[in-house]
Image (cartoon, rainbow, N blue to C red):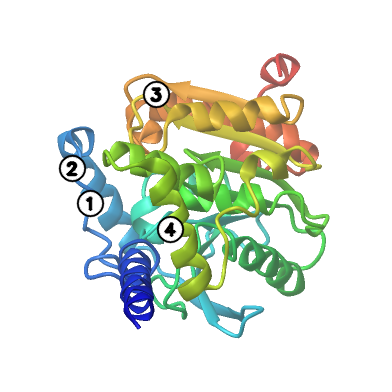
């Protein structure tokens, strides 16, 4: 009886601990998650707070059409379609962990608008107006990405050029979807500060929090399996990009303390022929576009010309001399 009592106590402690981890790491939405103007606290971000809020407010002023799809596990997922030019190429955008489209893409929206693209900003599962109460670090979101590309193909036709873009978890999401049989009109991926795999980002976060990383990762894996129905030890961006047909443009700030820069380097090294990596000194998490906006836009412009060729929007086209230098 004593042993049975001890076992029951240990089981109660285990399930209590894993539930607490699930609520902390995967349950959504949390209290401030869907507030566009709620910025993560960091010295680099605080120094540019006014600039960021101005960009967010400008994004909030853009009219959009609400669109929706049904996920494979029967959740209604919503997005914001911003049409600037009828028939223009489309960029399908995936925001980060507990982020919002307007916050995470506040600097990216004006660039792509200038370059002649329409935008569909996805509200990831468990965020904003999309259903589900669990975020899965890209594990289930990668299938949502596949389904959104099919929605775009059916709505706009199989010939409309499409780019995928993501920031942070959204970047990992699109990279982990890159080895799927995506529609042929999906031409490339722009990924900013992705993590190499769900397991690695949990391990790294535990290190940052001065926890025992192996134990914390195993406990988080148990929480993911029991309460979220997914595993951290499945897909990874590193493995997925090894098999992709798509050319990938990768950005990362060298002062990123949330998702270390070495993770993008690992992704780049997994398929150097298909992946172009640009590092930004002094830039924090998702902030490369703020630190060197002209360089960032130039990289995007060159990439678009390379992957779209004659289908490049007029606003993004390079001169013959610039094209020759690609």
Is there CB contact under 8 Å for labels 2 and 4? no
- Quarter of the image for the N terminus: give it: bottom left
Q: Which mark is residue 39?
A: 1
Q: Which is more foreground, mark 2 or mark 4?
A: 4
Q: Which mark is residue 254?
A: 3
Is there CB contact under 8 Å for labels 2 and 1? yes
Secondary structure beneath dot 2 equals helix
Residue bearing mark 4: 220
Calculate the distance from the C-alpha at mark 1 to the C-alpha at mark 3.
20 Å
Between 18 and 50, which is closer to the camera in this rendering? 18
Of pointers 2 and 4, the one earlier in the residue sequence: 2
Calculate the distance from the C-alpha at mark 4 to the C-alpha at mark 1.
25 Å
Q: Which is more foreground, mark 2 or mark 1?
A: 1
Secondary structure beneath dot 3 equals loop
Whether residue 284 is visible: yes
Residue under the image location 72 percent in, 24 percent down: 272
For label 1, the crowd category at 10 Å Cα-Cα, with few meaning under 14, some 14 to 19 and many 20 or more, is: some
Of pointers 2 and 1, the one earlier in the residue sequence: 1
Residue under the image location 39 percent in, 31 percent down: 288
């Amino acid at each position: 009886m004593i042993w049975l009592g001890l076992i029951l106590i240990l089981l109660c402690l285990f399930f209590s601990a894993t539930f607490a981890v699930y609520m902390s790491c995967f349950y959504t939405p949390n209290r401030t998650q869907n507030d566009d103007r709620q910025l993560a606290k960091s010295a680099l971000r605080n120094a540019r707070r006014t600039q960021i809020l101005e960009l967010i407010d400008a994004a909030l002023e853009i009219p959009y059409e609400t669109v929706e799809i049904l996920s494979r596990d029967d959740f209604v997922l919503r997005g914001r379609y911003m049409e600037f030019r009828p028939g223009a190429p489309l960029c399908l955008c995936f925001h980060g962990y507990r982020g919002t489209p307007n916050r995470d893409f506040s600097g990216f929206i004006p660039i792509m608008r200038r370059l002649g693209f329409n935008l569909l900003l996805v509200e990831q599962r468990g965020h904003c107006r999309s259903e589900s109460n669990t975020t899965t670090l890209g594990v289930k979101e990668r299938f949502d990405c596949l389904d959104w590309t099919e929605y775009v193909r059916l709505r706009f036709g199989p010939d409309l050029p499409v780019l995928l873009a993501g920031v942070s978890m959204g970047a990992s999401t699109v990279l982990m979807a890159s080895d799927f049989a995506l529609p042929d009109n999906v031409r490339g991926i722009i990924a900013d500060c992705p993590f190499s795999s769900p397991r690695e980002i949990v391990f790294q976060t535990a290190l940052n929090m001065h926890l025992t990383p192996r134990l914390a990762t195993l406990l988080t894996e148990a929480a993911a399996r029991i309460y979220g129905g997914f595993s951290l030890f499945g897909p990874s961006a590193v493995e997925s990009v090894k098999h992709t047909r798509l050319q990938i443009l990768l950005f990362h700030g060298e002062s990123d303390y949330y998702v270390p820069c070495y993770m993008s380097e690992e992704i780049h090294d997994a398929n150097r022929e298909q992946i172009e990596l640009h590092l930004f000194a002094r830039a924090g998490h998702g902030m490369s576009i703020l630190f060197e906006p002209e360089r960032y836009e130039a990289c995007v412009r060159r990439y678009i010309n390379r992957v779209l060729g004659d289908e490049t929007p007029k606003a993004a086209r390079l001169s013959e001399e610039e094209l020759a230098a690609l």
